[in-house]
Image (cartoon, helix red, strand yellow):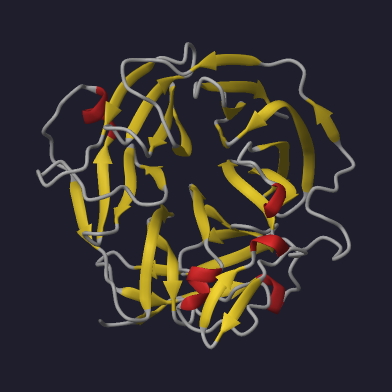
């Protein structure tokens, strides 16, 4: 595979990265709001909604990635909670897939996700889905996979494909317009200890969330998140959190395993919008966490400035935002019913 060079500017090397005091947690805010006024809708429809792993906003809809049902992606009306459209099945037909990856995003009115088993980057036009069509052209691009380059998710940022997964020498990957691998010289913004090569991506797993020319990466089981901006010929690190809770692991002769008893739940989900990011966060130790989600949402600017800490009325598991509203997905443990709380943010 021909590798090209793509420059990455790290602000913390060149200018000194903007970061909070090392003794201050990412959830330490001077401005705190207890949310008492909000609207709520119950997700309902003929399609079973179960095991929601990702939540995104698209125009009048919330798009849910549905892991445990026949249809993988559900379009939920923001006003009434009704599932108006459902799309995406597992199978071998032209418009079916082996899997829908660990994450999805929306770019140029298309759903973007990785069919990991088939090593394909998928771009499915949303207008065709909403029209009710069953068979329509779907763009499928071969994702380059090598011994040193093993992504499991991607998004499009400023026209560039940015990928997350397991990479020998880099934090994330970038592809050019012909899907050639570009060298980024990107690094993890924390001490990875004895973990080497592609194993960094298996120990320090995360997710990537885009917003136009910017994107965010957060690391699971930690309080670590990174904010980036794309320019014509570079990707610039705007901010990274101090990382008080780097995932703890054991190293048994190169066999790595996270240590649940020493890790926190950390960042559960992250949502982006034009002027900043929201973090659904819990500092509950993993051994005490009961998969209830969190009531804490942290609002940061893209430059890493703390804007506001929201205390939600109920535990929520996923979040997303549009230009005005924050949407929080909650699950009733007794009925397995999903409810979405929404309120305006400042």
Q: Quadrant of residue 44?
A: top left
| Outermost bottom residue | 253
Quadrant where the image shows the C terminus: top right
x, y percent for residue 113: 33, 49
- Against 286, residue 313 (above or below) is above
Q: Quadrant of residue 13?
A: bottom right
Closer to the camera in the image, 45 or 18? 45
x, y percent for residue 289: 68, 46
Asked if residue 186 shows in the view, the reply is no
- Against 251, residue 228 (above or below) is above
Asked if residue 298 shows in the view, the reply is yes
* Residue ID at (37%, 39%): 67
Closer to the camera in the image, 136 or 191? 191
x, y percent for residue 157: 44, 54
x, y percent for residue 194: 61, 85
**Left or right: 330 as drawn, with respect to 128:** right
**Left or right: 67 as drawn, with respect to 9:** left
* Residue ID at (24%, 29%): 129
Closer to the camera in the image, 219 or 256? 256
- Against 244, residue 58 (above or below) is above
* Residue ID at (46%, 18%): 43
Report the number of numbered marks. 0
| Outermost top residue | 80
* Residue ID at (14%, 29%): 134
Closer to the camera in the image, 315 or 307? 315
**Left or right: 88 as drawn, with respect to 300:** left
Quadrant where the image shows the N terminus: bottom left
């Amino acid at each position: 595979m021909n590798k090209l060079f793509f420059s990455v500017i790290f602000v913390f090397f060149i200018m000194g990265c903007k970061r909070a005091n090392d003794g201050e947690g990412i959830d330490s805010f001077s401005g705190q709001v207890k949310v008492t006024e909000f609207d709520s809708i119950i997700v309902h429809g003929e399609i079973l909604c179960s095991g929601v792993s990702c939540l995104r906003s698209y125009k009048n809809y919330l798009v849910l990635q549905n892991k445990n049902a026949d249809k993988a992606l559900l379009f939920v009306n923001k006003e009434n909670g009704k599932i108006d459209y459902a799309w995406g099945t597992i199978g071998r037909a032209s418009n079916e897939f082996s899997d829908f990856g660990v994450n999805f995003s929306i770019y140029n009115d298309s759903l973007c996700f990785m069919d990991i088993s088939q090593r394909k980057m998928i771009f499915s036009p949303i207008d065709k889905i909403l029209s009710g069509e069953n068979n329509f052209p779907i763009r499928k691009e071969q994702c380059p996979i090598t011994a040193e380059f093993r992504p499991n998710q991607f998004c499009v940022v400023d026209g560039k494909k940015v990928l997350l997964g397991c990479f020998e020498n880099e934090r994330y990957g970038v592809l050019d317009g012909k899907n050639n691998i570009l060298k980024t010289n990107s690094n993890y913004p924390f001490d990875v200890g004895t973990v080497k090569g592609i194993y960094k991506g298996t120990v320090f797993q995360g997710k990537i969330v885009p917003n136009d020319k910017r994107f965010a990466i957060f690391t699971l089981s930690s309080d670590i998140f990174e904010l980036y901006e794309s320019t014509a010929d570079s990707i610039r690190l705007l901010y990274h959190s101090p990382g008080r809770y780097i995932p703890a692991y054991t190293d048994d002769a190169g066999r790595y395993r996270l240590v649940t008893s020493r890790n926190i739940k950390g960042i559960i989900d992250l949502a982006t919008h034009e002027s900043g990011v929201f973090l659904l966060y819990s500092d509950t130790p993993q051994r005490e966490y009961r998969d209830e989600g969190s009531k804490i949402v942290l609002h940061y600017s893209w430059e890493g400035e703390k804007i506001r800490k929201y205390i939600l009325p109920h535990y929520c598991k996923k979040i997303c935002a549009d230009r005005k509203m924050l949407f929080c997905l909650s699950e009733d443990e007794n009925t397995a019913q999903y409810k979405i709380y929404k309120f305006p943010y400042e």
